[in-house]
Image (spheres, rainbow, N blue to C red):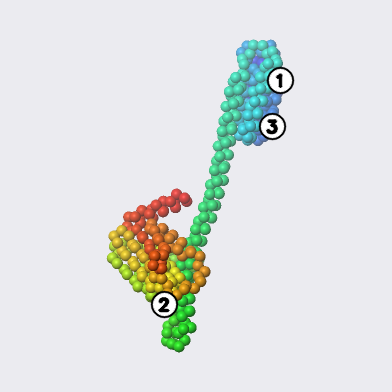
């Protein structure tokens, strides 16, 4: 840039080699300065361009010499404007563009430079392109930075949401484990004072309390062991399945709940352990609610296997005595609905119109269940 500018100024602009090299170094230095400090470099380049235009405004210009900007000076100042627009906001870049175009135009109006080749239109086009390119690149860079910031925030929010969902899942699992056994223990403890005259029944009642407490501690220990373990494959004992429903019903019968069961149809497909655990927890929570809220009621449990679905219904009659106050907050029904939805089914719960209460779950089997899980996995992967 310095060589080209000094040659044009020294020969075509008739300024002499010494003055040409000095002014060329001024513009070349501005171009180097713009790499680190574009604003001062723009002032230096504009001053150098104005000085060249003023010094070359003489009738001795050779014919068709570019003026008031020289071609090398024009390219150098366009590069300075490009670097400036990459660092400053668009209004400041537009102001620099206006000054870069207006100042040589005023010099052209005020001076008599003889016959020359006008560079005003070329100045406007080239400088405008440089500023537009720089502003576009700066906008894209700012957009990428904002997008990266939003992605980081989304990652943090997703991690927090995952943490909250995991806390909710653990809370529901703990609720299912503790609420059932504690309900049975509470009922058995209420009956115990009335059995003092019959030592045999009292001993059986106390043994039932002890067994339920041990079962609750065992399930809690199993769950906490899974939470504490770093190895997801490590065994911590089998989870309850549908085959354990008989033991569950026998347990609540031991607490004084009158339960009858009805199983129809033959299982045409074996559910995976996760689905069986969800159905077991739904049944467990429904029976626990019967113990707490319907003392003296008769409970009927119906499990029906069909070709494409599994129907589970727990119905209790009206309670014979008022239910004691319960500190529950409705998390049990919420957990049952979420478990049935997770399996692609639905759950309904509410009064049956005769003073009793009914909880029924419809769980699809086969292709519908597989399709629901594939959709759930696809949604989870997409969000991840």
Residue displayed at 68% across by 22% down: 103
Q: Please tell me whether residue 9 is drawn above or below residue 238 in the rendered image.
A: above
Cα gap from disc 1 to disc 3, whole angstroms: 23 Å
Q: Please tell me whether residue 102 is drawn above or below residue 287 in the rendered image.
A: above
Q: Nearer the viewer, residue 174 or 59?
A: 174
User: x, y (%) of residue 46?
Assistant: 68, 25
Residue displayed at 53% across by 50% down: 155
Q: Secondary structure at mark 1?
A: helix
Residue at image mark 1? 19
Left or right placement of residue 22 versus residue 338 in this view: right
Residue displayed at 70% across by 23% down: 22
Q: Nearer the viewer, mark 2 or mark 3?
A: 2
Q: Secondary structure at mark 3?
A: helix
Residue at image mark 3? 40
Q: State the mark number for residue 256.
A: 2
Q: Quadrant of residue 25?
A: top right
Left or right placement of residue 210 versus residue 96 in this view: left
Q: Nearer the viewer, mark 1 or mark 2?
A: 2
């Amino acid at each position: 840039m310095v060589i080209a500018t000094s040659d044009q100024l020294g020969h075509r602009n008739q300024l002499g080699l010494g003055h040409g090299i000095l002014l060329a170094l001024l513009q070349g230095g501005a171009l180097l300065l713009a790499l680190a400090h574009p604003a001062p470099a723009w002032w230096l380049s504009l001053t150098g361009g104005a000085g060249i235009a003023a010094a070359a405004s003489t009738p001795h210009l050779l014919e068709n010499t570019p003026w008031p900007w020289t071609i090398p000076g024009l390219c150098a100042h366009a590069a300075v404007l490009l670097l400036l627009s990459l660092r400053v906001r668009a209004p400041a870049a537009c102001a620099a563009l206006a000054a870069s175009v207006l100042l040589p135009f005023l010099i052209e109006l005020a001076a008599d430079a003889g016959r020359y080749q006008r560079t005003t239109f070329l100045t406007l086009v080239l400088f405008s392109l440089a500023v537009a390119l720089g502003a576009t690149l700066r906008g894209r860079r700012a957009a990428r930075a904002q997008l990266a910031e939003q992605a980081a925030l989304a990652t943090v929010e997703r991690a927090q949401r995952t943490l909250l969902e995991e806390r909710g899942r653990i809370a529901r699992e703990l609720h299912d484990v503790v609420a059932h056994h504690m309900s049975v223990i509470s009922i058995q403890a209420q009956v115990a004072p009335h059995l003092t005259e019959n030592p045999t029944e009292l001993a059986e009642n106390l043994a039932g309390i002890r067994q339920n407490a041990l079962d609750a501690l065992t399930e809690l220990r199993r769950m906490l062991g899974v939470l504490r373990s770093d190895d997801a494959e490590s065994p911590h004992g089998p989870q309850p399945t549908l085959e354990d429903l008989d033991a569950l019903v026998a347990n609540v019968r031991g607490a004084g709940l009158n339960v009858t069961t009805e199983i129809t149809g033959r299982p045409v497909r074996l559910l995976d352990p996760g689905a069986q655990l969800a159905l077991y927890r739904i049944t467990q929570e429904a029976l626990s609610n019967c113990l707490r809220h319907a003392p003296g009621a008769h409970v009927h449990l119906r499990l029906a296997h069909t070709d494409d679905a599994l129907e589970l219904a727990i119905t209790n009659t009206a309670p014979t005595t008022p239910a004691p106050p319960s500190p529950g907050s409705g998390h049990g029904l919420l957990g049952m609905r979420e478990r049935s939805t997770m399996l692609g089914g639905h759950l309904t719960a509410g009064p049956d119109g005769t003073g009793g209460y009914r909880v029924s779950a419809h769980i699809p089997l086969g292709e519908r269940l597989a399709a629901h899980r594939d959709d759930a996995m696809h949604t989870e992967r997409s969000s991840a």
